[in-house]
């Protein structure tokens, strides 16, 4: 679809003790309304954000409701107020000035769009260049990760959109629903993509749309006990909840690999793996 002057675009950012990143991210956004959901930061960060950027729409959560819950506050607001497009964006990113336009031009009532995502610390190296979900293992893969940016502009269909950035028309939310809050953090993007696939909705990777991602800033790093627990638990839930989507091999693959990682890890990370396996097997 082409960008329409009647399009009403909202960008949803979730802030949790990430004031400086959020301020930098807001500075890079043009051509859309900005909704910042503060996920009960330890200090009064939302008031500082609104003081610097008074045009931002601020929503204060009384508790940390995770990536899914925080985004859902913003999604609910945007749907209620008639926005045609809702872009979920990690607060630890900075976006190209034309990114929003490219994404809006390449999504529709039966497709979402995602940009090329590069490392902030290495701005010519790709972190995400499209992706897919492996039905045999339950894993989601980033295409081109670690590769030099070739400036390829070919739009591709893919099956995995990272929650770091998605442009989603309101009609898509009306068809498949909002984010699944029981996941709290990690795998919620994969779960959303499975629902998209089951509903026949495409994911369009648009390489002319670009952002730069400060990897791990919003979650204390992907190797932390916090991340380890949720990634482990939620992967079990994902392949169990959608056993008709994944192949029968997915659940034993998840179980075996996580058990192996228990023996390869140490200290608090090992404990997080064990808790994640236990809670993942127990179910929601």
Image (cartoon, grey):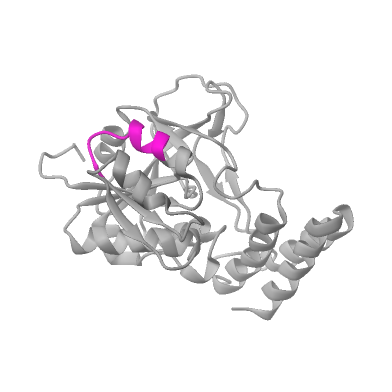
Position of residue 38 in the picture relative to residue 220 (left or right): left
Q: How many marks?
A: 0
Along the viewing direction, whichever of 42 and 272 lies nearer the viewer? 42
- Asked if residue 190 is positioned above or below residue 10 in the image, the reply reads below
Over which residues does the magenta segment extend?
23-33
Q: Which image quadrant for residue 126?
A: top right
Whether residue 7 appears in this view of the structure is yes
Residue lying farthest left?
Answer: 6
Along the viewing direction, whichever of 220 and 47 lies nearer the viewer? 47
Q: Where does residue 217 sit, x and y in percent of width and height?
A: 57, 42
Position of residue 208 in the picture relative to residue 20 (left or right): left
Q: Where does residue 212 sit, x and y in percent of width and height?
A: 48, 31
In reply to whether residue 194 is colored magenta, the answer given is no
For the point 60% across and 26% down, the residue is 147
Along the viewing direction, whichever of 212 and 207 lies nearer the viewer? 212
In reply to whether residue 30 is colored magenta, the answer given is yes
- Asked if residue 213 is positioned above or below residue 90 in the image, the reply reads above
Along the viewing direction, whichever of 196 and 276 lies nearer the viewer? 276
Q: Which image quadrant for residue 201?
A: bottom left
For the point 48% across and 58% down, the residue is 67
- Asked if residue 271 is positioned above or below residue 205 in the image, the reply reads below
For the point 50% across and 49% down, the residue is 160
């Amino acid at each position: 679809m082409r960008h329409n002057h009647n399009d009403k675009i909202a960008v949803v950012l979730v802030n949790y003790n990430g004031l400086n990143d959020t301020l930098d991210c807001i500075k890079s956004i043009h051509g859309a309304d900005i909704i910042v959901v503060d996920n009960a930061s330890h200090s009064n960060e939302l008031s500082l954000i609104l003081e610097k950027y008074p045009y931002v729409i601020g929503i204060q959560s009384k508790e940390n409701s995770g990536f899914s819950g925080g985004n859902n506050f913003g999604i609910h607001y945007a749907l209620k107020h008639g926005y045609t497009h809702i872009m979920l964006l990690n607060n630890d990113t900075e976006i190209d000035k034309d990114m929003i336009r490219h994404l809006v031009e390449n999504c529709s009532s039966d497709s979402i769009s995602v940009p090329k995502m590069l490392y902030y610390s290495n701005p010519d190296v790709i972190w995400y260049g499209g992706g897919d979900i492996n039905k045999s293992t339950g894993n989601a893969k980033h295409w081109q990760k670690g590769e030099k940016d070739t400036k390829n502009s070919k739009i591709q269909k893919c099956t995995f959109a990272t929650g770091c950035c998605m442009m989603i028309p309101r009609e898509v939310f009306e068809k498949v629903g909002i984010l699944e809050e029981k996941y709290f953090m990690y795998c919620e993007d994969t779960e959303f993509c499975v629902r998209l696939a089951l509903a026949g909705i495409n994911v369009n990777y648009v390489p002319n749309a670009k952002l730069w991602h400060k990897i791990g800033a919003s979650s204390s790093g992907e190797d932390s006990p916090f991340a380890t627990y949720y990634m482990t638990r939620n992967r079990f839930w994902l392949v169990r909840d959608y056993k008709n989507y994944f192949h029968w091999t997915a659940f034993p693959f998840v179980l075996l690999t996580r058990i192996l990682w228990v023996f390869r890890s140490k200290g608090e990370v090992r404990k997080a793996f064990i808790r994640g396996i236990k809670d993942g097997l127990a179910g929601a």
